Each structure stands twice: as C-alpha cells, then as structure tokens.
Image (spheres, helix red, strand yellow):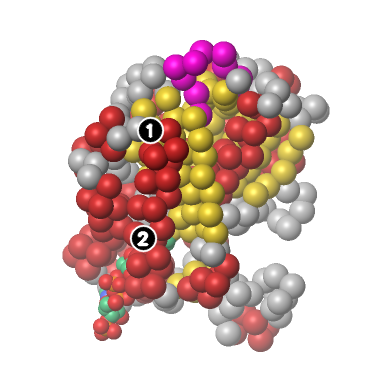
Amino acid sequence: MRSLIVGTGSYSPEKVLTNADLEKIVDTNDQWIVERTGIRERHVAAESEATSDLAYAAAVKALEMAKVAPEDVDLIIVGTVTPDMSFPSTACLVQGRLGNKKAAAFDVSAACAGSLYALAVADRFVSTGMAKNALVIGADTLTRITDWTDRNTCILFGDGAGAMVLQPTDDPRRGILSVHLHADGSYGHILNMPGGGSRNPVSQKVIDERLPFIKMKGSEVYKVAVRALEEVCREALARNGVAASDLAQVIAHQANKRILDSTLHRLGVPEEKCWMNLEKYGNTSSASVPTTLDEANRAGRLRPGDALLMMAIGGGMAWGSALVRW
Ligand code: COA
C-alpha cells in the first residue's frame, strides 16, 4: 500500500516586507537582493501570530480539500524549528485547535527540510496501515529568530505554513514512491541558532552576543546545498527508474533562485517545470515545500499520475527528496 497526498493547504501572513523596506533597516539594496537570491518580498507574522496559528490555518485548508473532518485525523506531524514554545509540541497545539482527540501528534526538527522529514515519517505510518488520515505540516516563523542587524541573513527569510493530508491508496499508478533523507552534522556550524537552547540558555549576555538568532556562512551553505540536492534527487530518480525528462513538476524548497537554477541545470530539468514563488515569500523554511505544492496544486498544474520530484535542504545540514506519482 502507498500513501497518497489527497489535500494541500497553505497560509501566508498578511504583512509584507519588501526589499525597499529592508533598505531602511540594513545597508542593502533591492538589486543586490534580487540578483543574489531572487527574493523581492517576504511575509511576516503579526505580533499576535505564532507558528501554530499559521500551521492551523494551513491545516484547515488542506483538510477541507481532502474532505477529512478534523476529528478523523489520526496523525499530526509538524516540521518546525520555530515552535511556539519548547513544549507542548506545535503539533499538539494544532491538534487542540482542531478539536481532535485521537491523533498522535509530534514535531520533527530538520530546519528547512522539516516538511520532507515529516512527510517521510507520515508516509511510513500510512503505507503500513498505522494511520488512515495523516496531517503533515511545515510551519515556521523564521523572522522571530532573524537578526535584523545582519544583512547577510535578514534579507532571506519569511514566515508561513503549508500542509498536506495523506491517505492510503491501492491504486498502483499513484502515491508516494519513495522518500530519501540524509544529514551531515559536521556542517552544523554553517547554519544554526546557537542561543536559547541548553547550550546557551537565554540570559542578558547571550542576547547581547546575539546568539538566539540565525547564524549562517552563506557561501558554504550554498556549496553544500547544490551538491546535496543534486545527489538526493538523482537517488530518488534512480530508485524508481524515472528519467529527469519524465518529470512533470519539481517542487523545491525555495531558498535561493541561484541554488535552484544550478540544481535544475545539473539534473537537466527545464526551469519551467519548477514552481517558483520565492520572489514573494523568501525562504520560509519547512513551510516552503508544502506551500509551493499547494500553489501548484491549486493552479491545476498537477494531474493524476504525474511524476513529481520534491527536494529540500536546511540547517543540520539535513536534506531530502521525494518522488511522487500525483
Ligand atoms: N546587501 C548588500 N551586500 C551584501 C548583503 C546584502 N544584504 N549581504 C552580504 N553582502 C555583501 C557581503 O558583505 C560581501 O561584501 P564584501 O565582498 O565587501 O565582503 C558581498 O556582499 C558578497 O558576500 P557573499 O556572502 O560572498 O555573497 P554571496 O554571493 O555568497 O551571496 C548569499 C550571499 C547569502 C545570497 C548566498 O551565499 C546564498 O544564497 N547562500 C545560501 C543561503 C541559503 O540559502 N540559506 C538557507 C539554506 S536552507
């Protein structure tokens, strides 16, 4: 038995921060940001909004599309590195908002690859019969851990949430064919948030040293990302005997246009097959893949049986791919 994605949903906060707005905050300019990243604007959560609020809004839309009542969900997994609080998990908070009493609920932490990691876990539950209606959410409010004095990072990130509903299917032509996950912890230092956990608990000194914020060695991340994404995409294609030319659509983590262009070029996939939205959302971490999937889905770009390749990479470094017959 395979699992099939039967519903998608996404939510983007109302407030928009443009490159022109950023020019007033740090020493940068629209041209530099667009040329190096492709990003023009990003959405920022309202003061009253936390990650679980974004996650809930995306989940409701995905459940509506799937025609699944919230009380019938039996598994909720949220990929996030910006939970509302250390515990309860964001998944439990979403479950409470949904009024659901029976689902197992937990978060997974794989930064921008969080929703692919969550998808891999949910796929195992559904394909082995342990869950019948699984809700997979990627939700992050990276702007809450963004250092607005650091022009190297603050131009990149935005907030959002995306959700997918998985159900078992007997249809041999459709469903998630395989998910491939990898990590290399020796790269932990090139993209991290060193403060606010048990290593550097919050204190005035830790805040003054600006440790509870994202730190990134951009060019190193760039190099690892291009290599890892190509490898993990080739792994998914080879496992399933699918040629790059057979792909109908690529759904990729929207980190940076240059990373995506380079990865697509190496794979030999034309750019038009990759749904792009980073110019309006920036890098929304684990929200990126399910939000992009939802946009492509609602635009009618995905037809039953189409070969769909998903890919993501984030802090850890952790990365993955999935090959799906829609
Ligand atoms: N505006 C203007 N100039 C900036 C700037 C900004 N926002 N940020 C950095 N610069 C400057 C640097 O200070 C540097 O100046 P210098 O040469 O005088 O020292 C110059 O631009 C080049 O910086 P560099 O970091 O080498 O640029 P880059 O070409 O590597 O581009 C990134 C920077 C961040 C866009 C790029 O490295 C990248 O996209 N990395 C991957 C990041 C990512 O996707 N992370 C998330 C993965 S999930």
Helix, strand or loop under label 1: loop
The amino acid type, in three-letter code, at marker 1 is Gly
Q: Is residue 152 left or right of residue 287?
A: left
Residue 314 in the figure: left or right of residue 229? right
Relative to 3, 130 lies left or right: right
Image quadrant occupied by the N terminus? top right
What residue type is disc 2 on? Arg
Residue on which the image places disc 1: 241
Q: Is the distance from the Cβ of mark 2 to the nearest ligand 1 atom less than 8 Å?
A: no
Does residue 210 lie above or below 284 as drawn? below
The magenta stretch is: 167-176
Answer with mark 1 or mark 2, whichever residue precedes in sequence: 2
Q: In the image, is residue 291 above or below residue 19?
A: above
- Residue of label 2: 227
- Find out whether residue 290 is within the magenta segment: no
**Residue 222 shows up from this direction:** yes
Determine the CA span between mark 1 and mark 2.
21 Å
The answer, for residue 142, to whether it is visible in the render is no
x and y, in percent, of residue 149 in the image:
43, 76
Q: Quadrant of the C terminus?
A: top left
Looking at the picture, how far across and down is residue 139, in whole percent? Answer: 55, 46
The residue drawn where x is 42% and y is 45% is 235
Q: Residues within 10 Å of mark 2 (few under 14, many from 20)?
A: some
Give the residue displayed 23% in from the left and 60% down from the top.
34
Task: From the viewer's side, name the closer residue of 162 and 51.
Answer: 162
